[in-house]
Image (cartoon, rainbow, N blue to C red):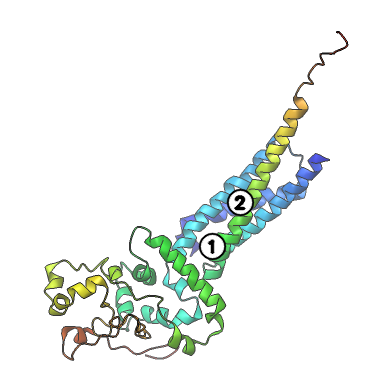
């Protein structure tokens, strides 16, 4: 695992060098001359900064991994479904695309825009806070019933890849009829009546946004036939 | 006396830096939410504090050395008058 990440190797090497210098200083206690100051500059400044910089990059990259998201027990069903090659949920189908791959949680949930990455990281901090203060001791079954998005899933995130401007998209009758609603965010692409919920455990959005994730289409329409038929599957359960 | 105090402060800075480095290495070996969060907050605060402490000691030591080398100004005595 480590060999695949050159920055991790750099960070560990810097950490080893800094630790050696600091331990030698603590054990030998040399006088505070010019040479000692220079060594301490390396041990307290240069190498630890190297560890921090390489560690930050590796840390941010780690937070994009599905494995990272699934490390909180309440997210295990979502991560497992994404990782399931036989699942037909939106999340799983996107995860099988190389562009998303093991980072499919981040690619879909990261806010789009100039400050998207920063806002997403701040949102992640809130996730950690909620987990530590609330969900840590909540059972998986209860969590599956209660976990929800803070705000409706933005269609702009879908439109990062799926353009809503090409004729191929607009000629679909359902798209054409709901074009304004989709662009304004009044109808979610990932709603029951359109392309289906992203995860088997997704719940309809709150009543404050009535058309988000709750809109239904007549049977036989394009959207209805595209809806994935999935059932929740927990780790350890046979397909 | 002052050199002893500097050495003690520097030893504390070294211990602080070692703890910070250990937290950062923990997040590299186990990249899960808590280690990453702790490394990016507590670990880096410890590392920054240790560096600032070291720089403070170096500046204070250089200042002391400068003051020690500075010539004592000659007295222009009022006795001549």
Residue A164, position as x, y percentages in the image: 19, 69
The kind of secondary structure element at disc 2 is helix
Residue A30, position as x, y percentages in the image: 76, 42
The chain identifier of the residue carrying mark 2 reads B
Q: Is residue B21 left or right of residue A206?
A: right
Residue A206 found in image quarter:
bottom left
Position of residue A198 relative to residue A43, above or below, is below
Q: Nearer the viewer, residue A209 or A196?
A: A209
Q: Residue furthest top?
A: B81
Can residue A8 be seen by looking at this rendering?
Answer: no
Mark 1 burial class by Cα count in 10 Å: few <14, some 14-19, many 20+: many
Q: Is residue A117 left or right of residue A59?
A: left
Q: What residue would you read off at disc 2?
A: B48
Q: What residue would you read off at disc 1?
A: B28
Identify the residue at image location x=25%, y=71%: A184
Residue A108 found in image quarter:
bottom left
Identify the residue at image location x=56%, y=83%: A137
Q: Nearer the viewer, residue A85 or B64?
A: B64
């Amino acid at each position: 695992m480590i060999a695949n990440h050159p920055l991790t190797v750099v960070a560990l090497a810097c950490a080893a060098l800094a630790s050696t210098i600091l331990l030698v200083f603590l054990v030998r206690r040399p006088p505070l001359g010019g040479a000692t100051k220079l060594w301490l500059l390396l041990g307290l400044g240069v190498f630890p900064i190297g560890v921090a910089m390489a560690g930050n990059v590796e840390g941010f990259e780690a937070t994009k991994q599905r494995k990272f998201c699934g490390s909180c027990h309440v997210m295990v069903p979502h991560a497992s479904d994404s990782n399931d090659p036989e699942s037909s949920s939106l999340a799983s189908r996107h995860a099988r695309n190389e562009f998303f791959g093991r980072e499919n949680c981040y690619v879909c949930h990261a806010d789009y825009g100039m400050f998207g990455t920063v806002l997403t990281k701040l949102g992640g901090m809130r996730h950690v806070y909620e987990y530590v203060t609330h969900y840590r001791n909540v059972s998986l079954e209860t969590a599956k019933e209660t976990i929800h998005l803070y705000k409706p899933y933005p269609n702009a995130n879908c439109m990062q890849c799926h353009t809503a401007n090409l004729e191929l998209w607009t000629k679909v009758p359902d798209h054409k009829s709901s074009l304004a609603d989709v662009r304004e965010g009044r109808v979610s692409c990932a709603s029951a009546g359109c392309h289906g919920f992203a995860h088997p455990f997704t719940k309809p959005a709150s009543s404050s946004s009535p058309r988000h994730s709750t809109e239904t289409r007549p049977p036989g329409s394009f959207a209805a036939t595209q809806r994935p038929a999935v059932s929740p599957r927990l780790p350890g359960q046979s397909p | 006396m002052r050199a002893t105090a500097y050495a003690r402060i520097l030893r504390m800075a070294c211990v602080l830096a070692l703890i910070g480095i250990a937290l950062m290495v923990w997040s590299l070996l186990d990249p899960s939410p808590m280690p990453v969060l702790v490394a990016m907050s507590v670990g880096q605060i410890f590392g920054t504090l240790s560096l600032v402490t070291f720089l403070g000691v170096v500046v204070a030591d250089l200042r002391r050395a400068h003051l020690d080398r500075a010539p004592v100004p000659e007295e222009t005595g009022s006795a001549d008058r």
